[in-house]
């Protein structure tokens, strides 16, 4: 077992999961804020759509993504003709797949957090002369921050363990798109139990650490 | 000549648990201290929130210190942040993620400023001195007593030099023993800052201690507007004043009771 066999997929996984969490957070917070504060028809349908990636098989999601961002997909063809880039079989593609799968975890947590912010604080801020942007940045976001952070940690853990959608979009190219969970699968298939054991332990340790940290954040603040 | 401080003439249909009742409130208050008195569900809160810009009436007109804040006939609806009024929430709504000093400075600090400027710090310090909050600048709202919370909320509201101070049941969240003291304090604060105030309450003691103009509200309608300045105030005749006010409120309640008997379905809450 060489260090390359562990270190390369570990670093790649952290990179993919990090970017996926970033993307899922930006999108999740914006959508959650809109759905928590605006009243419009079809709101609950949209909520269900946004939660869909949580319950759908990752391979199905991966297939949808392939149809969208693949060479012949509407987004993929546009990216290729405009920027000359292709997402399929790249780590960026893996990050997008992981972001889609992890999105509902941020979205759900952020929406609950925003709905838990008492409107009175926002009203108080408005009367104190604050614009809507300032109300969001100075009041709503800080008060919802813990819940959003907890969602981000879950999203990170979920992105780290992503397998199905990532495999569909990015494949399993060692050193390029082969993340930890895919490397585990390949190691077992190849009969490399020592590698598999080590990868499994590393993955488990990171996931447990993330869950412990998010559990800490979700506990109510020490107020007396 | 007295300046017209507050001018309200608003209409709005309120919905509460499936029932509707019309809010139809019209009064002017030329005095420094106005009190709107009425039971819960009478529409006091909505009226106060409409003045602050937190509720939008269907039609009508609101003006404070001669400035029109809302006028449905000309399409004026100044957003809450530009109305220049201060609002004291019943439970003060101090920001729990900020310290006392940050709460007080909140209305005069921009969101891109990480820290208060020296000028701002001086103003915050000044106000903390005035409101006897020295040494509490770094404390969090949940560490304060009820009276201290109210002082922080007042300081936070007055740092912006508002045109009027609106107070929503300012003493309801306080220990009854503390209320008298805080009423005196509020009166002194108002004098010091020379800001007109409008209080909503269902406590006759508030009326007695604070009101120059009394607006009695019931079922979303103004029952009567009374000038209490003529009544003796806080001397050996203090008792006479209180009794006169009690009589007024009892009269109003009797009429209200009769109105209730006539239209029980209109009742909300």
Image (spheres, rainbow, N blue to C red):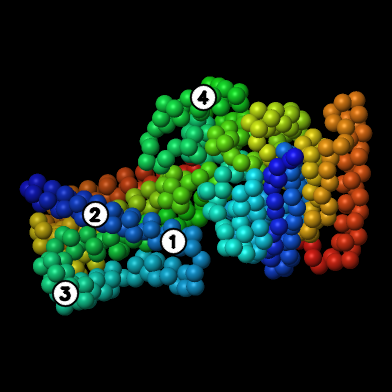
Query: Which residue is label 1 attached to?
Result: A34
Residue B79 as seen in the image, left or right of residue B51: left
Q: How many marks?
A: 4
Residue A141 in view in this figure: no
* Same subunit, tags 1 and 2: yes
Residue depicted at 51% across the width and 66% down the height: A39
Real-space Cα distance between discs 1 and 3? 30 Å
Residue A96 locus on image (x, y percent): 24, 62
Query: Which residue is label 4 attached to?
Result: B125
Q: B227 or B67, which is in the foreground?
A: B67
Secondary element at image label 3: helix
Q: Chain of mark 3?
A: A
* Crowd rating for badge 3 (residues with CA inside 10 Å; few <14, some 14–19, many 20+): some
Query: Which residue is label 3 attached to?
Result: A77
Disc 2 versus disc 4: nearer the observer = 4
Q: Earlier in the sequence, mark 1 or mark 2?
A: 2
Q: Earlier in the sequence, mark 1 or mark 3?
A: 1
Real-space Cα distance between discs 3 and 2? 23 Å
């Amino acid at each position: 077992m060489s260090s390359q066999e562990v270190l390369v997929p570990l670093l790649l996984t952290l990179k993919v999961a990090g970017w996926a969490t970033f993307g899922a957070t930006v999108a999740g917070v914006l959508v959650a804020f809109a759905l928590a504060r605006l009243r419009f028809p079809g709101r609950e349908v949209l909520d269900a759509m946004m939660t869909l990636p949580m319950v759908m098989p990752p391979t199905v999601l991966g297939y949808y993504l392939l149809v969208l961002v693949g060479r012949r997909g509407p987004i993929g063809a546009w990216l290729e003709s405009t920027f000359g880039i292709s997402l399929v079989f790249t780590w960026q593609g893996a990050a997008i797949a992981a972001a889609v799968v992890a999105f509902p975890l941020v979205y759900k947590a952020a929406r609950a957090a925003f709905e838990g912010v008492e409107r009175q604080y926002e009203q108080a801020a408005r009367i104190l002369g604050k614009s809507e942007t300032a109300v969001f940045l100075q009041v709503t976001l800080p008060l919802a921050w813990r819940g959003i952070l907890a969602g981000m940690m879950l999203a990170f853990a979920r992105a780290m363990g992503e397998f199905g959608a990532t495999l569909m979009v990015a494949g399993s190219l060692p050193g390029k798109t082969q993340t930890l969970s895919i490397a585990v699968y390949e190691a077992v298939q190849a009969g490399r139990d020592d590698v598999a054991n080590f990868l499994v332990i590393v993955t488990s340790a990171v996931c447990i650490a993330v869950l412990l940290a998010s559990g800490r954040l979700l506990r109510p603040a020490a107020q007396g | 000549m007295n300046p017209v401080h507050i001018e309200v003439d608003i209409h709005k249909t309120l919905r509460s648990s499936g029932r509707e009742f019309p809010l139809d409130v019209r009064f002017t208050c030329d005095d420094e201290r106005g009190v709107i008195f009425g039971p819960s569900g009478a529409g006091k809160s909505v009226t106060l929130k409409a003045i602050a810009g937190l509720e939008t009436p269907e039609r009508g007109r609101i003006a404070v210190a001669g400035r029109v804040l809302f006028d449905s006939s000309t399409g004026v609806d100044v957003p809450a942040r530009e109305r220049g009024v201060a609002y004291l929430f019943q439970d003060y709504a101090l920001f729990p993620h900020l310290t006392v000093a940050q709460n007080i400075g909140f209305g005069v600090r921009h969101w891109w400023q990480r820290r208060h400027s020296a000028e701002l710090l001086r103003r915050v310090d000044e106000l903390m001195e005035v409101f006897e909050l020295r040494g509490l600048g770094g404390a969090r709202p949940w560490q304060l007593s009820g009276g201290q919370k109210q002082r922080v909320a007042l300081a936070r509201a007055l740092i912006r030099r508002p045109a009027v101070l609106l107070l929503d049941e300012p003493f309801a969240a306080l220990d009854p023993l503390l209320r008298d003291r805080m009423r005196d304090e509020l009166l002194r604060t108002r004098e010091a800052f020379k800001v007109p105030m409008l209080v909503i309450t269902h406590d006759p003691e508030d009326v007695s201690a604070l009101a120059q103009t009394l607006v009695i509200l019931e079922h979303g309608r103004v029952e009567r507007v009374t000038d209490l300045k003529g009544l003796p105030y806080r001397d050996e005749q203090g008792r006479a004043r209180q009794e006169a006010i009690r009589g007024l409120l009892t009269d109003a309640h009797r009429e209200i009771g009769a109105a209730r008997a006539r239209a029980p379905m209109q009742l909300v809450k």
